[in-house]
Amino acid sequence: MGKVEICGVNTSKLPLLKEDEKTLLFERIAEGDMHAREQYIEGNLRLVLSVIKRFSQSDENVDDLFQIGCVGLIKAIDNFDRTLGVKFSTYAVPMIIGEIRRYLRDGGSIRVSRSLKDIAYRALQVKEAMQKANQKEPTIEEISAELGIPREDIVYALDAIQSPMSLYEPIYTDGGDTLFVMDQISDKKNKEELWVEQIALNEALKRLADREKEIIVLRFFEGKTQMEVAEMIGISQAQVSRLEKNALKVMRHYLA
């Protein structure tokens, strides 16, 4: 854990971003600036280093842990919502830890070949470039044609680098309620079969305040994520989570 060079990166020379630099970079990232995204990743690699120190008793190679931690960091950057009003590190650390723990839990023994990784990362880069240029997500066939690589190889490579995530994986906590992966997933299926529609729903909804009722309708009838609801009604995702939990508690009490 005391090595200076990890995965070819000289950790003693990693940059340290100031708060104003982070703000400016995130503004550029929101506009699709991939160079700013790379700068932000590099500027937060010290965060990954601090997290992997917690796993110093692990038998895993530090280079592997660093790579997995970087995956968590990138996920955090791509999903971070500045309107939550928290520091990026507060949001990112649980994501990085979760990624490493999942890797260790799953055995950490499955190794993806370098050539397969290269295909996957090239495919992801091409996907991002084509999506930005055409304003729509490219198909596997289009990516295949662009790279000159068989469709089956690309599908296999992309699948090989995917890691499963539990719906109960914590992604953010403000010291009170914790937000989980499932809280950010839309329910596009079986919206007509949700439990709130199978019982005395109308009477239960009448017990709610107007804002709580609006949140329940948007979440469970229209399949919106908490983030989408927060944007629609002008409050934070953490507030939506609290109001939603309270509304469900009231409804369950009435329906008990």
Image (spheres, rainbow, N blue to C red):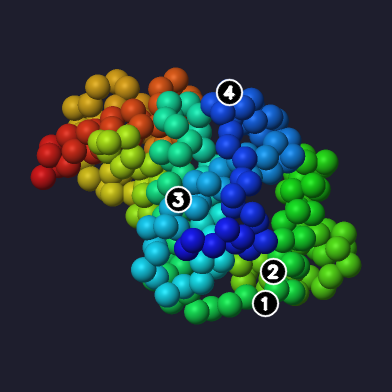
Q: CA distance from mark 1 to mark 4?
A: 39 Å
Placement of 255 over or under 49, stated as above or below: above
Give the quarter of the image for residue 155: bottom right
Residue 8, position as x, y percentages in the image:
67, 61
Q: Nearer the viewer, mark 1 or mark 4?
A: 4
Quarter holding the C terminus is top left
Residue 43, position as x, y percentages in the image:
60, 41
Q: CA distance from mark 1 to mark 2?
A: 6 Å
Residue named by callout 2: 117
User: Who is closer to the viewer here, 254 or 180?
Assistant: 180
Give amino acid for label 4: Asp
Looking at the image, do the residues carrying marks 4 and 3 touch, with CB atoms under 8 Å apart?
no
Q: Residues within 10 Å of mark 1 (few under 14, many from 20)?
A: few
Q: Nearer the viewer, mark 2 or mark 4?
A: 4
Residue named by callout 4: 20
Q: Say which label, 3 or 1, has the lower sequence index.
A: 3
Q: CA distance from mark 2 to mark 4?
A: 35 Å
Q: CA distance from mark 3 to mark 2?
A: 26 Å
Give amino acid for label 2: Lys
Q: Residues within 10 Å of mark 4 (few under 14, many from 20)?
A: few
